[in-house]
Image (tube, grey):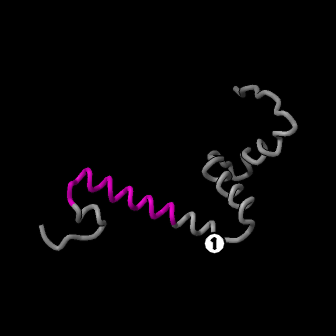
Amino acid sequence: MARAVAPVPLFLRPAVDSFLSAAQGTIRPWSERGFFLLFHSLFGLDSLPFRVAAFVTMSVDLLLVAWLTRRLTVRRSAASLRRSSGP
């Protein structure tokens, strides 16, 4: 059953339309579309800021995984994501 949605004021229409699902069925507007809309408005089509943001995000993710692994296993070798040579 479809839920009725209140009408959107005219001045908010572009912002709301940019987060609506497209043909590919996007359901994460803040993480998918918000990132690209924000970076495009700030940097245009320059790819370097997009790549730097992705690299920083992945680096922080790796640090968090290493920290969490160390907290759970209390082994530095497990947290460093490398193979230990001995027991």
The quadrant in which the C terminus is found is bottom left
The stretch of residues the image draws in magenta is 56-75
Q: Nearer the viewer, residue 41 or 8?
A: 41
> Quarter-wise, where is residue 75 in the image?
bottom left
Q: For the stretch drawn in magenta, what is the main secondary structure?
A: helix
Residue sitting farthest toward the right? 10
Residue at 66 percent across and 47 percent down: it is 29
Secondary structure of the residue carrying numbered label 1? helix
Left or right, 32 with reference to 12 = left
Residue at 68 percent across and 60 percent down: it is 39
Left or right, 79 with reference to 17 = left
The quadrant in which the N terminus is found is top right
Q: Nearer the viewer, residue 63 or 81?
A: 63
Residue labelled with disc 1 = 48
Indicate the amino acid at tag 1.
Answer: Leu
Residue sitting farthest toward the left? 87
Q: Does residue 36 belong to the magenta stretch?
A: no
Q: Looking at the picture, how far across and down is residue 56, in whole percent?
A: 51, 64
Residue at 81 percent across and 39 percent down: it is 12
Q: Looking at the picture, how far across and down is residue 32, in whole percent?
A: 63, 53
> Quarter-wise, where is residue 67 in the image?
bottom left
Q: Nearer the viewer, residue 56 or 79?
A: 56
Left or right, 50 with reference to 3 = left
Residue at 63 percent across and 67 percent down: it is 49
Q: Looking at the picture, how far across and down is residue 33, in whole percent?
A: 68, 52
Q: Looking at the picture, how far across and down is residue 9, in whole percent?
A: 84, 33
